[in-house]
Image (tube, rainbow, N blue to C red):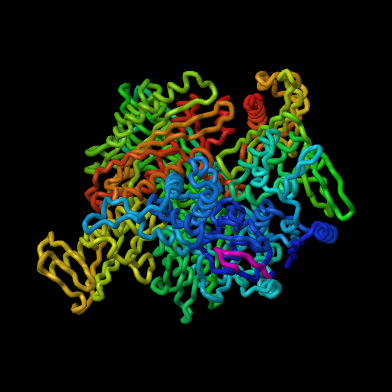
Amino acid sequence: MSAYHRPASLDQALAIRAGADVAVLAGGTDIIPARTARAAWGDPPRQDVLDISAIPGLNRVETTETGWRIGCLVTWSGLLRAGLPPLFDGLCQAAREVGGAQVQNRGTLAGNLVTASPAGDGIPNLLALAAKVELASAEGRRILPLAHFLTGYRATALRRDELLVAVQVPRLDGAQGGFRKLGARRYLVISIAMAAGVVALDGQGRIRTARLALGACSAVAQRLPALEAALRGVTLAEAAQVPQAAHLDGLAPIDDIRASAAYRRDAALVLLRDLLAGMPTP
Amino acid sequence: MMEIACILNGAPRRFRVDPMAPLSDTLREGLGLTGTKEGCNAGDCGACTVLIDGAQACACLVPSAQAAGAEIATVEARDGAVGALLARLRAAFLAHGAAQCGICSPGMLMAATDLLLRDPAPDRAAVQDALGGVLCRCTGYVKILDAVQAASRGLLPAGEMPPAGAAVGAPIARLDGAAKLDGTERFGADEAPEGALWLRIMRSPHAHARFTLGDLEAARQRLGLAAILSAADVPGSNAFGIMPHLKDQPVLAEAHVRFRGEAVLALVGSRAALAALRDADLPVAWEPLPALQGTAAARAPDAPQLHPHAPGNLLIEGRLNRGTEAPPAAVTAETHFRTGFVEHAYIEPEAGYAVPAPDGAGMEVFACTQAPYMDREETARVLGVAEELVRIRPSACGGGFGGKLDASIQPLLAVAARRLGRPVRITYSRAESMASTTKRHPAAITARMAADAEGHFTSYAFEADFNTGAYASWGTTVANRVPVHAGGPYRIPHLRNRARAIYTNDTPAGAFRGFGVPQAALATESLVDDLAAKLGLDRWEIRRRNAIGRGDTTHSGQVLHASAGLPACLDALKPDWEAMLAEVAAHNADAPRLRLGAGIACMWYGCGNTSMSNPSRMKLVLGRDGRLTLFNGAVDIGQGSTTVLAQICADALGLPLDQFRFVLGDTALTHDAGKTSASRQTFVSGRAAMETGLALRRRILALANAGEDAALALEGTRLSVGAARVIDLATLDADLEAEGRYDPPTTALDENGQGTPYATYGFAAQIALVAVDRALGTVKVRRIVAAQDVGRAVNPTLVLGQIHGGIAQGLGLALMEEFLPGRTENLHDYLIPTAGDVPEIVVRLVEDPEPEGPYGAKGVGEPALVPTAPAILSAIRHATGVTLHEVPVLPHRLWEALR
């Protein structure tokens, strides 16, 4: 029988993590379905479990000098209660649309990153927020830009002795976030494609900074640097006309049970335009 | 194991738990709180929703260790704010008919409690958001949303029970509702004998393979199991199946598997040993074979033959010929239509237990089912014992829709219990339920339809291959029923219909609400729209012009003498249709991207088995102790037969409904009422219940020498008959007993499919309003108006429940549901509608009484589903100009069609 660890301090957790190959569990909303799927076909997982949910201090959203720090036990619902500014509107929209209320109450934003599904709803939002992840081990801490942390399909740079302890989001004054999720039903739906973005305007109402990302259209959600550059200096009223198919050249959407690759590519463009068209003018 | 302390339903508790065991399992198996249901163990269905520290959570996703220090509330909560809200919600759910089978009800109630704790006066959108994580397959959600909003306004008073003679037609709350809402209802997984061993089935991971077994005894010892059973251990016939001549599915495969998910070995032991066991540790050597996936592969000239009795892999071809070959016509239309597998997605996976009699012959099986007497026959044959030695006790059935007509766990449990000589229990996992039990048949249809210049239909031809999968199941029924219905409820003089059931290496297809008729209706209603377009006729108008009605002759040559209300259904929809068309035109004038569309479809559906005897028999006893008991063998799978049959019986007898007690479903105690399928229980068993009530009434009147219209009244053991006479039941020599039986009159179909296959038909028409996003290919159904001829609405609340639920399933068929063997064996890849996907539903009941039916009633359940998907496709076409030839209309498929 496999071991179940539920330490009451981060140091204990890191010591356990350093000493054994454990599945790290917080809200359980990804790990348990995966175990259920394996067990159903006669392959029950035997990996030990490190439950980090009892570690104090990790479920806070803190304001720092440079921005915000979201602890790794902050749930989707917790994010919605944190009183975050419009910069986070996209991420908060994702928090309302991921799974159902049950998943939103238990699942964590950090878990969404560590699972690193191409369809993880938090990922394009946090890419657009230029988030960094704070990784802790018994050796110390390191900070990685999210784009470097996500290394491939369900793969990350997280070492076997590390825990993702927080997500850092830098300030972007006056910025507005947005999110568009596309699925085949209203609730409890894995995204076919999604677009997330953050836009900040200059004093003349022109786009000073635009950061846009697409999810479920490549093995890892991606920022769109060419589009972001093209949006600079454009007014919000004109922004929806800017995204073009060529801006999505770096994507590699796939055919699967939810949609075709060609559809995803086209829908992603529609979602981007809708996202920009729907950005509230200040 | 670890010890934890928590507050559970208001009281401090300490108990030992397996820290990784889901909280739902600890509640159910450890603490006996079985009100919390498990439907998927993956957070996909929400049936296990509880409150943790006041917030709703799927208990299946919470390791028990995380309950430490938490405050947990379940549906069993009675006290405090949670208890008070639950009481209000229960009353509202009952009054609104918001619980049908009841398996999702605890989850719905807890999700709603979470909402009302935070928001005492939620709007509709807030209710949808709060309930969006709980799936319901029965109700179509509308009544649940209504009930939650009603509960937010206060405690509804309990409804009054109707007086004697006024039960039929009364919209009373279901009689079995309270237990479904307080957590005490017993579903298949909710009870088991002390010390029962657990059963787990090792299943084929291959769609087609040969295999050899190694040393099972050595494996048994090594793995610490009580037994590993194979085909060699089946005491009787290792075969089951629906038709007497087609017992083609082994209980445990013999050296050859024909689909992924087929049962290979039955593993019996402790739960822990079974949970830890890896299939790879079992001595099975596989030799995978090429698999025939889909009917085209199975019909190819060089395809291997899967069953010795089926050359060309053809199980059966059903035919209907009427009139001549298609005569010349003004306009013709042709379509090729494709549908996929559809999963029943009842929220209760198969579960139950078997207890062997000490004599080594008898067996009792407690399990969810739609067909206890068929289960008894299958189980007895597999055990090699007389049917009378097997007792089937149906558990509450957490949804069926046709999927629990076939035996699933029953033969496996019985074999294991017999071999071990001990009680054995099983609960299927969601993946196992989806991979191994039957589906709706995928269909590949070619159909042609023609009309004269005035829009009168002149001919129809239909050819379809239905994929029955690896085993026959109900494939013969689909092939027989479809040709009779395929042309639709229209006067058509010349027809040529062929429906084939083809064996493949896919998951077996069986019965699913409509037996192939919904697939055929998709093709046919699309042709009707084609003809309307070619003739420049309104789509309602062409249907009304051709609608079959009283005095008309069906495609099988049956004259409809009564209860043929399709013209009335269409007339009832006419104002809605015109308003809908106007709404669409007004909106679309300046909306190039989000287009509205209106669609329409009709259907007919024969109630009861096709040209086969399908009797029902009931018993009513008025005891010397004054107790009045209806012995009703019909299984209520949520549709409400327990309530409806009681209403009918009460009025036939002439005593008030609230004086009835019930013995339900048990093959040792009740007569065979036939299976709960084919929309037959209200019609067939309802008539039997009426005959039973009338028979007891005649006995009483004779005993009292009273006239026919004497009123009865029962008080204790005093039975008043009319104003003057009183019988003291306690002084009688014996209880007063009566039985009633009914078998609908049908005749066999001849070689041209001509005859009287059904005693009566249900008719319906629906119109749908959809919004299509042309850029994304997404479809939102905004409104459905359904008109249905139900003969007589014995219980309007329950009738509405059936129609709403049918519409939700039809919406799923149209827009999102597609089972792909090996790829969508869970409820997050296989999508069914959620609380946010159902439209506004308006129902226009038409009651054209059926003289054969009880008080004019006929079947309701299947007819409601049939027109929905074709009406939605008709609306999508209206919105976009695109004719679709495949369901589900996933966004990418519509997008491709729009290109």
Extent of the magenta region: B3-12
Q: Say whether residue B715 is left or right of residue B783.
A: left
Q: Residue furthest right?
A: A139
Pick whichever, A248 or A127, lies toward us: A127
Q: Nearer the viewer, residue A258 or B845?
A: B845
Residue occupying the point 59% across, 46% down: A100
Does the magenta portion include B5? yes
Above or below, A77 against B20 in this view is: above
Q: Position of residue B177 (x, y in %)?
A: 40, 58
Q: Give coordinates of residue A47: x percent, y percent.
A: 75, 60
Q: Residue at x 62, y 27 (%)?
A: A278
Residue name at image x 34 percent, y 41 percent: B604
B120 vs B256, nearest the viewer: B120
Asked where in the image residue B222 lies, by quadrant, the reply is: bottom right
Q: Is residue B140 visible?
A: no
Q: Is residue A222 above or below residue B110?
A: above
Side of A141 where B68 appears, left or right: left
